[in-house]
Amino acid sequence: MADRASALRLDRRGFLRTVGVAGTAVAAGGATAACSSGLQGSDGGDGDGGGDTIRIGYVSPSTGPLAAFGEADDFVIGSIQEHFSQNPIQVGGQSYAVEVLKRDSQSDSNRAADVAADLIQNNGIHLMLVSSTPDTSNPVSDQCEAQGMPCIATVTPWQPWFFGRGGQEGSKFQWTFNFFWGLEDVEAVYADMWDEVPTNKKAGALWPNDPDGLAWGDPTTGFAPAQAQRGYSIVDPGNYPNGTQDFSAQITQFKNEGAEILLGVPIPPDFTTFWRQAAQQGYQPKLATVAKALLFPSSVEALGPLGVNLGTEVWWSPSHPFTSSLTGQTAAQLAEAYTAATQKQWTQPIGFAHALFEVAAKAFGSVQAIDDKAGLASAISTMKLDTVVGSLDWTSGPVPNVAKTPVVGGQWRTGTDFAFDLTIVSNKQAPNIPVAGEVQPLGAPVAR
């Protein structure tokens, strides 16, 4: 277990420097810390807020290579604040307005830590919400843990969030919580998809040198041991730096070792680079299941015809049979509202961004005062809540302060209203989520 924690741990010295000089960092960058979306509370003011307003910090990547994760945040926050304006949160018998202070991590861990420190120290927030990959969720969670601020994270697999922050079996964090699936879940989903296409059972792996890549590629606790039990072997060229422009070495090794499956967790621009170079160099696996980079319509559209039948995990979609505990919207209605408001295709983080506020509202409704931080943390630690992303239960593990959500498998197919549709093709791990097609090999005739 020590090896796992060591492999996943972020730069702790860098984090401690951030905590130690948080005031200086914010003083130097406070003006740029404000979000320019025009949402209430995003003006970077002093944030005393008065005693009749619940102030919630929200950090996610709106710019940089992970910006697709935060694409729907303005819509979700705007909708949530409209809901709360009509339905104030009740705390201790009193109604409270809600103000959301959104900050952009810029897809940078140091920036994420800085804006989190600013929100905690200078903006008077009562609760922190954070979303989208360990690059943002981990440093924000670390700031909150160090400064006694309740924090709810999501869209970050629990292993890199827990072990990547130094968590160990038998221990727990005091202030920070997460809800999402784990590597064991996506390993099973991918293997279920692989089983549907005849291959030599060799999977070439694209593991970046970041918290996700280190977790997924860990030789002891990552994909390799789990997939070996299903009869698959991993061709692992080693971790590469984000922003790599030449993947010839990886492509050559995949070709030489006959990797008929492609696997990985690259950032979107890196996969675009890799996949175009793979086509140019004559590498076409029979199946590709790629996390992170293939979650979003924009990433697949950038590939044109090369995007057909690329596979990924699906953690939220309009066909998920869940309903918001706040607004009563089904997953389908929430996706439809996003498209109607933005003219854009639904994207997976919509549901999880919305669910963050479901959890926040439930937590505040469980305490007697909005500044009862210990009470908020206690409420989250024992919470069971049905949300638009499924049933959350923080009492069931797999480790303290983590609630798991379901995940299924999908492939991108030629679309109708949009260029591509993400079609659910494998639901063995969550049979209550319906499939809409079958797994198809790459290069097969397009089937919806």
Image (cartoon, grey):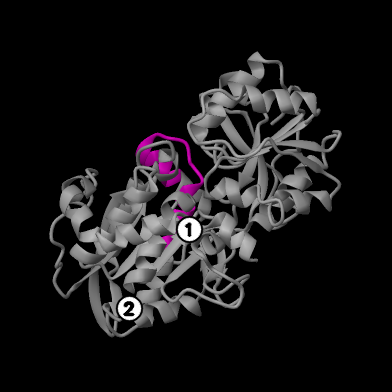
Q: Nearer the viewer, residue 311 or 112?
A: 112
> Residue type at mark 1?
Thr
Which residue corresponds to mark 1? Answer: 154
Q: Position of residue 382 (x, y in %)?
A: 50, 80
Magenta extent: 336-356
Quadrant assignment for the C terminus: top right
Residue 39 magenta-drawn?
no
Quarter in which the N terminus is drawn: bottom right
Label 1 Cα neighbours within 10 Å, binned few <14 / some 14-19 / many ≥20: many
* Residue tagged 2: 373
Q: Is residue 121 above or below residue 245?
A: below
Residue 430 occupies quadrant: bottom right
195 and 278: which is toward the camera: 278
As rendered, which of 308 and 292 lies closer to the eye?
Answer: 292
- Amino acid type of the residue that numbered disc 2 sits on in the rendered structure: Lys
In the image, residue 352 lies in the stretch drawn in magenta: yes
The image shows residue 248 at horizontal and vertical percentages of: 63, 22
Q: Residue at x 65, y 32 (%)?
A: 310
Q: Is residue 300 left or right of residue 79?
A: right
User: Most prominent secondary structure in the magenta stretch?
Assistant: helix
| The image quarter in which residue 256 lies | top right
Which residue is found at the position 29% from the left and 80% from the top?
91
* Total marks placed: 2
Residue 47 % position (x, y): 16, 63
Q: Is residue 446 visible?
A: no
Q: CA distance from mark 2 to mark 1?
A: 20 Å
